[in-house]
Amino acid sequence: MRMQVDREQEAADCFICRKHRGDIQVHGGTIYEDDLLYVGHISSNEKQAYLGYLIIDVKRHTPGLAELTEREAQSVGSMLTRVSRALKACEKAVHIYAAALGDHVPHFHIHVIPRYSNTPPSFWGLQVREWEGAPRGGQNQIEQVCSRIRAYLREDKG
């Protein structure tokens, strides 16, 4: 019983669960949502965010890959492919990185990070956002990116 109460409290305090409940608003709004998944643009305290940096969240509060149901795992895989295609088609990304870290937020989510042309090889990988020449923008630019990706996903049914 104590473990169940701890999990319920963890979910109540969880940043991702709070976002799904609508307690936290992110720039660009929801790109995609169904009963299993949520996709949105990364939300940060920075004034200029790395454009196209998306997050795929599983809606159910669960800590990691090993705890996903088969249906969740299939949905995550399919959505990862779809948003990667959208980033290449709409934002002209040349490569897509995906990482499930989970060190700071114990709710399964995948970071989907585009790499754009002209990115120096010394910034390839998860440090791609650290390049000073990377495409960045504020709320308006994030909303434009999200709008293009939403439109692409409506047309691309996977």
Image: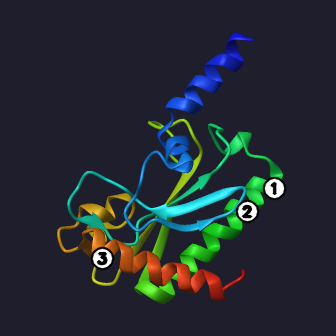
For marks 1 and 3, give the one nearer the viewer: 3
Number of numbered callouts drawn? 3
Q: Nearer the viewer, residue 137 or 18?
A: 18
Structural crowding at the residue carrying mark 2, measured as other residues with C-alpha within 10 Å and reported as few (<14), some (14–19) or many (≥20): some
Name the residue carrying label 3.
141
Residue type at numbered disc 1? Arg
Between 109 and 7, the residue placed more toward the observer is 7
Q: Position of residue 63 (x, y in %)?
A: 62, 37
Contact, CB < 8 Å: mark 1 with mark 2? yes
- The answer to whether residue 82 of the structure is visible from this angle is yes
Residue at image mark 1: 71
Given the image, on which type of amino acid does mark 3 rest? Answer: Gln
Q: Kindly report the distance in space between the C-alpha atoms of the residues bearing marks 2 and 3.
A: 28 Å
**Tag 2 near tag 3, CB within 8 Å:** no
- The structure residue drawn at horizontal position 43% and vertical position 48%, both measured from the top left corner, is 24
User: If the image is split into quadrants, where does the C terminus sit?
Assistant: bottom right
Name the residue located 51 percent from the left edge and 50 percent from the top edge. 22
- Please give the label number shown on residue 75: 2
> Position of 124 compared to 48: left or right?
right
Whole-percent x and y of residue 25? 41, 54
- The image shows residue 109 at horizontal and vertical percentages of 56, 50
Indicate the position of residue 138 as horizontal and vertical percent values: 25, 69
Q: Earlier in the sequence, mark 1 or mark 3?
A: 1
Q: Residue at x 42, y 81 (%)?
A: 93
Q: Residues within 10 Å of mark 1 (few under 14, many from 20)?
A: few
**CA gap, disc 1 to disc 3?**
33 Å
Label 3 environment density (alpha carbons within 10 Å; few <14, some 14–19, many ≥20): some
Residue 120 in sight from this viewpoint:
no
SS for callout 2:
helix
